[in-house]
Image: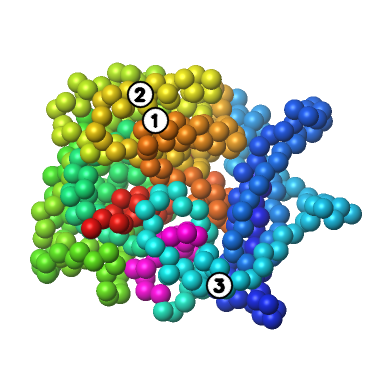
């Protein structure tokens, strides 16, 4: 793993720029193995490139990840916690390979943080960006003008567009008009992604609940958790999601039942609210509370392209299977996690093409969204058959993106890159979760969903 991490940011007069104070802006370097030209038994050679936008001085942070023998323990043995070995960044006497990189300070550049509010709203679900401490943002910015901060107080800010906070109620309002029927295919990562939608944002959204096992990484059924974790919540809908399907009337019922006080029935149609306030994951702005808007949701549990444990896309994604439901206007597909862990890349390349062809046949008039694999994967696995390395995972994802964009003109919803741009210490904290799964923490899921909501809602009239 190689990151370029901002150490400081000063203007031309040598004064620290307060917008980047202790920001530790991190740019993950996509590496590729070029060991074929060297002695593989003695050394591994990688090369990579990165594009830097924010002004400042960056230092190299390189680490070796234990993802082979020291990571995948034998069956029945305790798997050690995730850890890495820091690499010494020694580049003495070579002026062509500097150990630090300096990006010039230019407040007139479009990507400069001080100009962020001049950018258009994001409709791209894969827009590159960086994490900035919320305390550094200009006081003139309103909270609705940027996404909620992550648990470490940093906000995800794309370079070329801006993300705003969108309530689940507003999302349903727009979806009911543009994409009234959504069909969704994916594994337990998708099931966790759907929880906040079905619960109107009220899943693991309070700071006091985020240390619960289900909020951290577990995705077992609700009846395995104490009922006091969900007081008064209409939770069963999220669990029924992974049967044949769950319909929007249930989502709408959740929104109605979660709201207690009467409010203004008039709709808000502006892209950005005009007032400030509590815009957390469960916020419902005035005008959305008493509406009867909804969209149909059909979800099917799939394990990528693999035929495992009774699920396989060739049997599950058919015209006959979806015939009882509303024709899809939008189809969301999530792959990678199972494929990279248990499949082969050669088979995956063939099956992804076949899967894309099937989707086009079953959904000839639908629009498609490709949801990337998660950044976190396979933490405490004691399954010797499970294969993992970050480069392997990224290779599977890059190929699937290409196929879905080429064959289906799919829009990409990238949930892999933003966590990869977190400062090194934040990434390592999230890697050490007490689960054997590839599940993201609830805080990340809420933020991932905000990107999804922005890419679909922004730009609608």
Q: Which of marks 2 and 1 is nearer the N terminus?
A: 2
User: What is the quadrant of the C terminus in the image?
Assistant: bottom left
Tell me whether circle 2 and circle 3 mark residues in contact (CB < 8 Å): no
Give percent across and percent down for residue 207: 38, 61
* Residue 282 lies in the magenta-colored region: no
Q: Earlier in the sequence, mark 2 or mark 3?
A: 3
Total labels drawn: 3
Query: Nearest the camera: 253 or 43?
Result: 43
Residue 192 relative to residue 217: left or right: left
Asked whether residue 77 is in view, the answer is no
| Residue span colored magenta | 141-163
**Residue 307 falls in which quadrant of the image?**
top left
Residue at which label 2 appears: 357
Tag shown at residue 108: 3
Q: Residues within 10 Å of mark 1 (few under 14, many from 20)?
A: few
In space, the residues marked 3 and 1 are separated at their CA atoms by 39 Å
Residue at which label 1 appears: 407
Is most of the magenta stretch helix, strand or loop?
loop
**Residue 167 falls in which quadrant of the image?**
bottom left
Tag shown at residue 425: none
């Amino acid at each position: 793993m190689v990151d370029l991490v901002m150490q400081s940011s000063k203007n031309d007069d040598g004064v620290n720029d307060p917008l980047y104070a202790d920001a530790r802006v991190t740019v993950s370097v996509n590496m590729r193995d070029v060991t074929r030209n060297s002695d593989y038994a003695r050394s591994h050679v990688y090369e990579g490139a990165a594009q830097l936008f924010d002004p400042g001085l960056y230092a190299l942070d390189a680490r070796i990840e234990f993802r082979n023998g020291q990571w995948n323990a034998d069956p029945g043995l305790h798997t050690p916690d995730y850890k890495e070995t820091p690499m010494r960044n020694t580049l003495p006497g070579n002026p062509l390979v500097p150990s630090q990189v300096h990006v010039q300070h230019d407040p007139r550049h479009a990507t400069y943080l001080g100009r962020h509010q001049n950018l258009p709203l994001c409709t791209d679900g894969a827009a590159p960006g960086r994490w900035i401490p919320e305390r550094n943002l200009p006081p003139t910015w309103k909270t609705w003008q940027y996404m909620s901060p992550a648990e470490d107080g940093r906000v995800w800010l794309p370079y070329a567009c801006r993300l705003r906070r969108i309530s689940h109620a507003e999302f349903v309002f727009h979806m009911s008009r543009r994409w009234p029927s959504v069909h969704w295919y994916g594994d337990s990562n998708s099931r966790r992604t759907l929880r906040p939608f079905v619960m109107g944002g009220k899943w693991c959204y309070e700071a006091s609940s985020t240390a619960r096992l289900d909020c951290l990484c577990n995705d077992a059924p609700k009846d395995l958790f104490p009922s006091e974790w969900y007081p008064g919540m209409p939770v069963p809908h999220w669990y029924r999601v992974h049967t044949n399907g769950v319909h929007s009337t249930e989502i709408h019922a959740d929104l109605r039942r979660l709201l207690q006080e009467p409010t203004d029935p008039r709709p808000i149609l502006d892209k950005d609210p005009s007032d400030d306030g509590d815009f957390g994951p469960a916020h419902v702005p005035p005008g959305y509370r008493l509406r009867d808007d909804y969209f149909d949701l059909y979800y099917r549990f799939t394990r990528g392209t693999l035929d495992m444990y009774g699920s396989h896309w060739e049997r599950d994604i058919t015209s006959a299977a979806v015939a009882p439901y509303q024709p899809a206007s939008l189809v969301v597909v999530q792959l990678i996690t199972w494929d990279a862990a248990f499949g082969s890349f050669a088979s995956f390349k063939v099956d992804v093409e076949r899967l894309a062809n099937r989707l086009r046949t079953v959904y000839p008039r639908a629009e498609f969204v490709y949801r990337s694999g998660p950044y976190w994967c396979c933490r405490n696995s004691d399954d010797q058959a499970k294969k993992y390395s970050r480069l392997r995972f990224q290779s599977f994802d890059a190929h699937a993106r290409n196929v879905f964009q080429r064959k289906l003109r799919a829009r990409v919803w990238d949930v892999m890159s933003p966590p990869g741009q977190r400062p090194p210490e934040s990434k390592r904290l999230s890697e050490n979760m007490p689960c054997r799964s590839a599940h993201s923490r609830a805080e990340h899921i809420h933020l991932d969903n905000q990107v999804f909501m922005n890419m679909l809602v922004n730009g609608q009239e």
